[in-house]
Amino acid sequence: MQAEEEGLMRAMCFYDALDFPPTRAELVRGCDHVSRSAYHVSHIAHHVSSVQRLLDQGMLMETRGRLTFHGREAIVAEHELREGLFPRKIRNARRVARWLARLDGVRFVALCNTTALMHARDEGDLDFFIITRAGTVWQTRAWATLPFLLSRRRPAEVHGKKDAVCLSFFIDDTALDLSPLVLAGDDVYFRHWFLSLLPLYDDGIGQKFWEANAPLRLRHPYAKPWIVSSDLGVVRPCVRVPMPDFCERPARRVQSRAFPSSLQAIMNRDTCVVINEHVLKFHTDDGRAAFREAYIARCRTYGVAP
């Protein structure tokens, strides 16, 4: 198997572990080269040809423009059902983003996880990643969550409602490098999570964030920086909720005291729950390690190194 085909098959193993059938373009953008060789944009044509070779060899199947492994064609129909939910989910996500953009501490708001891929389940949450101005991450989180706390739209409080608002990952603009948050060894889910972010608001920090994480995307030579779509993005409002410096310490103290003992017992022990003055990451149910095992198993099945 040629290097281009191996890179594509590695990406395909990731997508299959996610039960997501990519298009040809999505597969090429996610192409994963272990060698970390320098590839030129002109090599994209070779990878496009490699996709066709994998199809001709029967390694991949194509159903209604989506790629799967043989015997996995059913996930195409499932994706089409989930894709049909995206208009509702993005409408609700934009409402959330409009509120977040009104907070003076907020610099970047992105949808993440399966919603960003238009692959979320009907009852799935709206997961957000947020970058704040330095010195405001705690008070920004307080204001960000307040309306969804009052309306009982947070994941733990949703009773029969859809599109719960999950605000569990904040960083400030001094902590743009995410490498301290990856699993030891290769964190395949985190790499693809980063590439698939769907920004809804960006005051310009997004480009610096992309550049700060060059090591995280080194294996993906054809990944492109995100852009805020004119159709999906929200604009900066004229009037914003102020985030004065003197409010940061009280905001941290009040929220820290409200943390349940179960959260306090696991915070800052690994990369799942990280809580400090620059990062607020509340992924108590972090499935990255289990996902990595599923991905590695698929790589072994199809004869490529993970």
Image: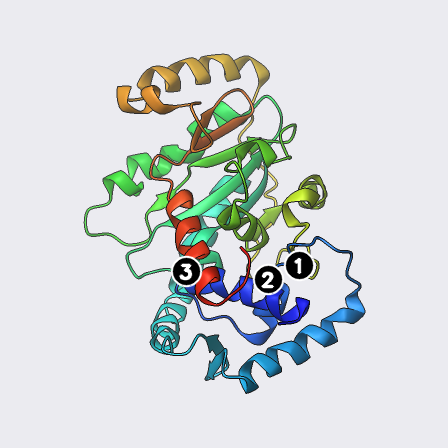
Q: Residue at x 65, y 27 (%)?
A: 174
Q: Residue at x 66, y 59 (%)?
A: 223
Q: Residues at badges 2 and 3 in contact (C-beta under 8 Å)?
A: no
What residue sits right under mark 3 in the picture? 17
Task: Tell me how far mark 2 sits from mark 3, CA to CA.
Answer: 14 Å
Q: Amino acid at mark 2?
A: Gly
Give the tally of numbered discs: 3
Badge 2 marks a residue whose secondary structure is: loop
Which of discs 3 and 1 lies nearer the camera? The answer is 3
Q: Position of residue 283 (x, y in %)?
A: 39, 36
- Few, some or many residues within 10 Å of mark 3 (<14, 14–19, 20+): some
Is 211 displayed left or right of 138 in the figure?
right
Q: Position of residue 254 (x, y in %)?
A: 38, 15
Q: Residues at badges 2 and 1 in contact (C-beta under 8 Å)?
A: yes
Badge 3 marks a residue whose secondary structure is: helix
Where residue 30 is drawn, which disc sits there?
2
Task: Tell me how far mark 3 sits from mark 1, CA to CA.
Answer: 20 Å
What residue sits right under mark 1 in the picture? 223
Task: Tell me how far mark 2 sits from mark 1, CA to CA.
Answer: 7 Å
Q: Residue at x 52, y 17 (%)?
A: 248
Q: Amino acid at mark 3?
A: Ala
Residue 82 versus residue 234: which sits nearer the camera?
A: 82
Q: Amino acid at mark 1?
A: Ala
